[in-house]
Image: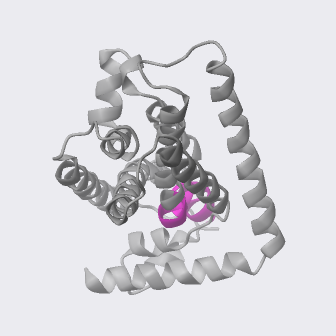
Amino acid sequence: MVRNIKLYISFLVASLKRMMEYRVDCLVGMVSQIAFQIIELIFIWVIFQNTDNIAGWDFEHLLLLYGVMMLSVTINDLLFDSTYDIGNRLIRKGKFDTILLRPVNPLISVLGETQTSTALGYLVISIVLIISMLIKLQNSITFILVIKLIYFGIIGALIIGGIQTIFSVAGFWTYKSNEVVWSVFQLHKLAEYPIEIYNKFVRILISVIFPFAYASYYPTLDYIGQGKSNLIIIAPIIAIIIWLIAIKVWNLALSKYRSTGN
């Protein structure tokens, strides 16, 4: 496990260096993502021009919730974005065969080839929102709170990344997994709002089946003093379970792999 983690970090660093060679492209991607997120924030602002709160959450609390989710999404994009299109990028073009020739677990190789630089835009938005909203809500930004933000940000990213990895195996059969992964990933949008606004089915969907709520809603409750103390134990257990399932599903799909050639 230690060797795989070291290899993964080496692959990830190499991928980030490769992306940074195209600085203009990175800058354009970052600016475009910031612009896209600003549009979404304007949409939330418009909603609050017609109401004082949503299920008891006022504008500041909702923006804090949004920022917390964006932090997990940012870390996920940096660490696990490469699972998004393995079908089209690797399997369909026959490039996955070269990965199988390496004396490395194929999943480690795939995860280490991050493809995104736009996550920097998400990072800017999330940090600005979290800090500014905590100040407006008169929450003291203590060392413990910062550690919690980093901790739950990483746990949330692991949960999102594990779910992405599970559904990325569709690429072994469809040779184009983008649509499948994207459809599931977009469910995280539901967790950008308080789960009280949803019916019982949706609450179960984003808290149990696809537990995106542990990347945003429940950590936010903890930051504002309304969360349960056992969250710090439950969240990593959920992340571990998801990744155990992801690895099992990945290995099963890998055993069914048939090369497409090139």
Q: Toward which corner of the image does residue 5 lie, by quadrant?
A: bottom left
Residue at the image position 44 percent from the left and 50 percent from the top: 164
Look at the image and tell me in which quarter the C terminus lies.
Answer: bottom right
Residue at the image position 73 percent from the left and 36 percent from the top: 39
Q: Toward which corner of the image does residue 16 lie, by quadrant?
A: bottom right
Spot occupied by residue 41 in the image (x, y as percentages of width and height): 66, 35
Residue at the image position 48 percent from the left and 19 percent from the top: 54
Q: Which residues are magenta?
A: 77-93
Residue 44 visible in image: yes
Spot occupied by residue 75 in the image (x, y as percentages of width and height): 49, 61
Q: Residue furthest right?
A: 24
Nearer to us in this view, 60 or 15: 60
Q: Is residue 150 magenta?
A: no
Nearer to us in this view, 166 or 193: 193
Residue at the image position 66 percent from the left and 65 percent from the top: 117
In this rendering, the answer to whether 62 lies above or below 8 is above
Secondary structure mostly taken by the magenta-highlighted segment of the chain: helix
Spot occupied by residue 82 in the image (x, y as percentages of width and height): 54, 63
